[in-house]
């Protein structure tokens, strides 16, 4: 215990010295909540700020972009990797979800992350755990309708992660636009201060050269499916151009879905135009900030994407 405490106390100093020498400091991987609390306290000494990047691992360039932005917004970065069982439905890919802790830790270390919080399921949901956070409204449509209970699982684990890490700022990918809306609503409704809702930052989606939005689930795609999957974002761009050009919204969305199916997707869960903040469905576009949100299945993958309209 004493040794862990000492290491945690000196690690911000080592990180600072490593920044001066240009050498990456070692990331501390922590699996127990009491160790995390001590390590976070040590990082905060002298009023230092913390930016937090929650993930489920299988890190890609999208996650690393979040980490880089986090570094520019605070003195220290804490990242988490936790494949959260509560946000997977009974027939979903919880067991198949890619897990590569050692490789992910190395990537985070190279990006200068101070702490990798990697709790076990027992640490997160100990025996007798009984609390659920459910955000109505923004959770009810799109992925919320297609994946019942998913956003309860997300809101619950993110609220716990915020309470555990106590960050000044938290960063999420805009690729999960609805998730970001749910988390912001939850933070506002529960008067969270660590982080305050205005410091919940959405970072632009990182795409492959083909236009395919980066996602840990892209690993489920075969080489051929990867090429077909790129058509999703192309069809979305065409629909947005049509809508902004004054075409009928319903007809543009139907044409987009037909193009997605023609590209080789087996089904389209939804393809909706929605208000960017409230996620209210829009049958007409009146120039407001809106978002085109799509979920579609190809091979073993269910891919989601969204883009700004206008
Ligand atoms: O976006 C994710 O990876 C997850 O939904 C999150 C926010 C880490 C919660 O488990």
Image: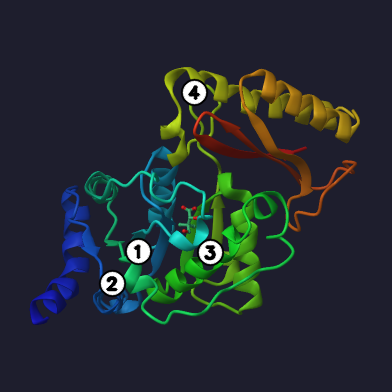
Q: Is mark 3 within 8 Å of ligand 1?
A: yes
Seen as rendered, the residue at the extreme left is: 3
Of circles 3 and 1, the one toward us is 3
Observer-nearest residue: 45 or 156?
Answer: 156
Of circles 4 and 1, the one toward us is 4
Q: Check residue 43 in the rendering and tell me which mark sits there, or answer none.
A: 2
Asked whether, in this view, residue 96 is left or right of residue 14, the answer is right
- Badge 4 or badge 2: first in the primary sequence: 2
The x, y position of residue 138, in whole percent, is 71, 60
- Badge 2 or badge 3: first in the primary sequence: 2
* Real-space Cα separation, disc 2 to disc 1, in angstroms: 9 Å
Q: Check residue 153 in the rendering and tell me which mark sits there, or answer none.
A: 3
Q: Which residue is mark 1?
A: 75
Residue at position x 76%, y 41% in the image: 272
Residue at position x 85%, y 46% in the image: 282
Of circles 4 and 2, the one toward us is 4
The x, y position of residue 168, in whole percent, is 46, 70
**SS for tag 2?**
helix
Observer-nearest residue: 27 or 164?
Answer: 164
**Coloring scheme of the render?**
rainbow
Observer-nearest residue: 78 or 248?
Answer: 248
Asked whether, in this view, residue 304 is left or right of residue 223, the answer is right
Q: Which residue is mark 4?
A: 226
**SS for tag 3?**
helix
Q: Is mark 4 within 8 Å of ligand 1?
A: no
């Amino acid at each position: 215990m004493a040794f862990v405490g000492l290491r945690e106390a000196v690690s911000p100093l080592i990180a600072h010295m490593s920044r001066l020498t240009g050498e990456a400091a070692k990331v501390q991987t922590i699996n127990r909540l009491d160790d995390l609390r001590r390590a976070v306290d040590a990082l905060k000494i002298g009023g230092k700020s913390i930016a937090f990047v929650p993930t489920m691992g299988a890190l890609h360039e999208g996650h690393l972009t979040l980490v880089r932005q986090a570094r520019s917004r605070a003195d220290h970065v804490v990242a988490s990797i936790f494949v959260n069982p509560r946000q997977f439905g009974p027939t979903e890919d919880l067991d198949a979800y890619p897990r590569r802790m050692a490789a992910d830790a190395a990537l985070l270390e190279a990006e200068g992350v101070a702490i990798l919080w990697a709790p076990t399921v027992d640490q997160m949901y100990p025996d007798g755990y009984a609390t659920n956070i459910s955000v109505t409204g923004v959770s009810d449509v799109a992925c919320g309708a297609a994946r019942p209970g998913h956003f309860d699982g997300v809101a619950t684990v993110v609220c716990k992660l915020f309470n555990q890490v106590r960050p000044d700022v938290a960063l999420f990918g805009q690729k999960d636009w609805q998730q970001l809306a749910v988390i912001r609503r939850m933070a506002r409704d529960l008067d969270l201060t660590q982080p305050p809702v205005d410091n919940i930052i959405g970072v632009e989606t990182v795409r492959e050269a083909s236009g395919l939005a980066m996602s840990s689930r892209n690993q489920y795609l075969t080489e051929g499916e990867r090429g077909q999957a790129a058509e999703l974002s192309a069809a979305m761009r065409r629909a947005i151009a049509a809508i902004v050009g004054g075409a009928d919204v319903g007809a543009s969305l139907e044409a987009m879905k037909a193009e997605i199916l023609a590209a080789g997707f087996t089904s389209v869960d939804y393809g909706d135009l929605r208000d960017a903040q409230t996620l209210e469905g829009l049958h007409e576009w009146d120039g407001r900030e809106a978002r085109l949100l799509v979920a579609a299945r190809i091979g073993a993958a269910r891919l989601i994407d969204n883009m700004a309209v206008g």
